[in-house]
Amino acid sequence: MPSSANKREREFQFSDRDFNRIRQLVSQHTGISLSEAKRDMVYSRLARRLREVDLQDFGSYCSLIDSPKGEDELLNFTNAITTNLTSFFREPHHFEYLQKTLLPELMKTNAQTRRLRIWSAGCSTGEEPYSIALAIREVIPENSDWDIKILATDLDSNVLAKGQSGIYDAERIAGLSKQRARNWFLRGKGDKQNLVRVHPALQEMISFKRLNLMNEWPIKGPFDFMFCRNVVIYFDKPTQSVLFDRYADLLVDDARLFLGHSETMFKVCDRFKLIGNTIYQKLK
């Protein structure tokens, strides 16, 4: 809870009800679960939006987001909350599907080549590709003689450097099981005791590269599956259509494409079919 002094200093009132309603909207539109610790961040980022749209309170702003007239502001709302905001195993249903359905299928399909190629587009600070690598290694161990490579791309060179380092605040893995944390992260010592480093077995699976999706792609593929979550929300529908077509060109037949919680291909691209919760399959 913010102190009464902080409340007095704030330009807008920000009640528990306001915060909980925003948390609900964020979960609904992005799949992110905001903890109490994010309260000040939420206020700071959305107070700017209130000023921009000339509203006096968070209740009115939430009503705008929920209204048909709020479609344009919804993008600003999403951007404000999700900019470089990621986590390990975000939208866990995707990783459950990956481990229980897709990987067993690919192990049969690719049994002769024993080769997997994956693309994490818009990888931010690396939590997504590391989650993919971890999920794979729990199903296909390092000593299984499979050739597995993950391409992780983003426009922002700063977040790529963070991902490349594989070093995170220890609190970033607080949501993982103790076994996963113990198996796949190395804890720092001394003045680095609040840091963790991703296990080298996961790091060596991933190549971090800077890529502007609007430019030419120096990528050959083909990829067996792809994560592109909370990326296309930044583009208009015609641009999304072009991107999805380009993705399809680099994916094998029947490949899966994982989108973000608030994203859809409905009336945007007909080269994929929806087979699960924001999980798409490329048509032959």
Image (tube, grey):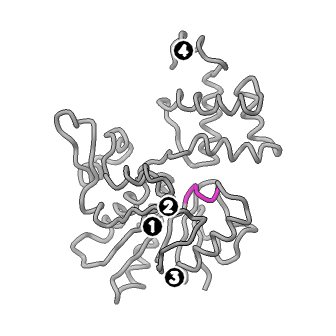
How far is disc 3 from disc 4 in space, using C-alphas? 54 Å
Q: Mark 1: few, some, or many residues within 10 Å (few <14, many ≥20)?
A: many
N-terminal label among 3 and 4: 4
Q: Which residues are magenta?
A: 229-233
Give the residue at x 36% y 65%. 207
| Dot label at residue 6 | 4
N-terminal label among 2 and 4: 4
Front residue of 180 and 156: 156
N-terminal label among 1 and 4: 4
**Farthest residue toward the bottom?**
112
Give the residue at x 55% y 58%. 229
Give the residue at x 17% y 38%. 189
Instruction: Give the vertical position of 148 relative to 37 (above or below).
Output: below
Amino acid marked by disc 1: Leu
Q: In the rendered image, which residue does mark 1 sit on?
A: 98
Q: In the rendered image, which residue does mark 3 sit on?
A: 252
Q: Secondary structure at mark 3?
A: strand
Front residue of 267 and 219: 219
Amino acid marked by disc 2: His
Give the residue at x 64% y 54%. 234
From the image, give the main secondary structure of the stretch colored magenta: loop
Left or right? Give the position of 55 relative to 88.
Answer: right
Q: In the rendered image, which residue does mark 2 sit on?
A: 94
How far is disc 2 from disc 4 in space, using C-alphas? 39 Å
How far is disc 1 from disc 3 in space, using C-alphas? 16 Å
**Label 1 vs label 3, nearer the camera:** 3
**Label 2 vs label 3, nearer the camera:** 3
How far is disc 1 from disc 2 in space, using C-alphas? 6 Å
How far is disc 2 from disc 3 in space, using C-alphas? 19 Å
Front residue of 211 and 109: 211
Q: Secondary structure at mark 4?
A: helix
